[in-house]
Amino acid sequence: MSRGRLTDFIGGAWVQSSATEVHPVANPATGEPLCETPLGAAGEVERAVSAATAAFGSWRAVPALDRARVLFRFKALLDDHKDELARLVTLEHGKTVPESAGEVRRGIENVEHACGIPSLMFGDMLEDVARGIDCESVRQPIGVFAGISPFNFPAMIPLWFWPYAVATGNTFVLKPSEQVPLAQRRITELAAEAGLPAGVLNLVNGGRACAEALCDHPGIAGISFVGSTPVAKAIYARASAAGKRVQALGGAKNHILVMPDADLAMACEIATESVFGCAGQRCLAGSVVVGIGSAYERLADALVRAAKALVIGDGGDARTVMGPLVSARQRERVIAYIDQAITQGAVPLIDGRAVGVPSLPRGHFLGPTIFAEVRDEMTIARDEVFGPVMILRRAADLDEAIAMVRRSEYANACSIVTQSGAAARKFRHEVGVSMLGVNIGVAAPMAFFPFGGHKSSFFGDLKAHGADAIRFFTDAKVVISRW
Ligand code: NAD
């Protein structure tokens, strides 16, 4: 049943957007209409920034311990509603319920981390920087921050940012992806229920125009963005030109290196889950599996067998291993990449284009595809596909495999499967990628550590999570004094 046209959350109340255009949202497995996202723009942003600005003075005066207490209550509410949130994610995004539950769990971990704000926000002090003169630094909130998030983790990704922003005493305007607005809407209700005062967290619905209005608004101090590389680059340039601090996380082309000493069953399981999990719609998803030396021949058959065994269907069905793509557009985009790869000479070992789910004719399903004979100059070797497509390549040795990874314009995640500590160490030391997995196919985000890539996968300097999040959302003020 459709929830109709969604409202925005501004100044503590759910209000109608003045947008005249909407983005229709439907269940990607069934085609059932879910809601309409209003495509708000400068007017909505203006109202939300006014509310956030008005709330800032009193919120920053709330002691850090009391801000943390609101987050503790919020965390408890998220725990109480985690199953409901996971079902909402599956409904609007299509991934399986266990995958959705996993992302909700990772989102909650960021709230747990932000609950430690009284100690995370500590400053420093040095007595007698000169005789009788002391110097101290404190971390202070800056004002209003904004977040712009992608479609692939509707519940988790906004929680990478706004809990830290409000924990440090800022106020926030969030623009979720117009394709998946429901989970974050529910999370915003829970934040209000936890006692977050009016105006501290605001939610505006919209697409590109709304994102651009956030970048341009002089009342916003900084932007946290996650999405595709071209948009990340544009947001970084636009918001920086408007004088803001920006952290913009972009796309990826992740490699999984399989050493000849690897346990074949483990390598196959790691690669299959990494590439085909969430139907390939993860920024940490493996894309290129590199069989090193004799590993290549052993992998090819095993990977095709594992791919053929994947059960495709509605993410809400407990038997499903791989759900649909998020939209018809995304499915067509992936099919176009497969068509082009074949034209350019890549050889499909298994081709998912004709695979559907007969009982769900309106679902955006695609079967797994595995390509061999891929060369550097082919588009499929370079571009982010963001769908269930695996590229199987060979390398003579680890040096050649690392060189292949280093040629990529992206540097988000990379994994190695091996039983050799020396190979793992060499990999860690030499591969120019930010998030690494050793015998792990998805280098999952951990709230306590920094998260983000480099090269075309990240624009900015302070990453998400960890100590960087506290630095991003605060100004380091230094006071030197003599009494
Ligand atoms: P997207 O770039 O299309 O959209 C992201 C957000 O930007 C959305 O809120 C959208 O409304 C807005 N937007 C879209 N076009 C815009 C434009 N021209 N100007 C301003 N704003 C615009 O990304 P998506 O398709 O929603 O998400 C998938 C992408 O996100 C993939 O490339 C994936 O790798 C990336 N991603 C990266 C990470 C990471 O941690 N690096 C995590 C998740 C997803």
Image: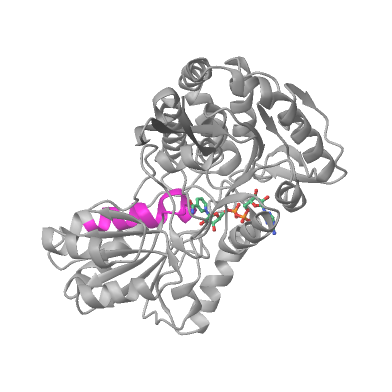
Q: Nearer the viewer, residue 242 or 271?
A: 242
Instruction: Residue 447 in the image: state x and y as whole percent.
Output: 40, 37
Residue drawn 54% across and 78% down? 340
Residue drawn 48% across and 54% down? 461
| Quadrant hosting residue 241 | bottom right
Instruction: Residue 279 in the image: state x and y as whole percent.
Output: 47, 53
Q: Does residue 482 show up?
A: yes
Vertical order, 133 against 297 (above or below): above
Q: Nearer the viewer, residue 94 or 479?
A: 479
What colour-coding does the image apply? one colour
Q: Is residue 275 magenta?
A: yes
Q: Quadrant of ligand 1?
A: bottom right
- Left or right, residue 216 beside residue 314: right
Where are the magenta residues, as a range? 267-284
Magenta residues, dominant SS class: helix
Instruction: Residue 97 in the image: state x and y as whole percent.
Output: 46, 35
Instruction: Residue 444 in the image: state x and y as whole percent.
Output: 36, 45
- Left or right, residue 126 beside residue 65: left
- Left or right, residue 384 beside residue 416: right
Q: Nearer the viewer, residue 477 or 276?
A: 477
| Quadrant hosting residue 334 | bottom right
Q: Does residue 96 show up?
A: no
Residue drawn 34% across and 71% down? 405
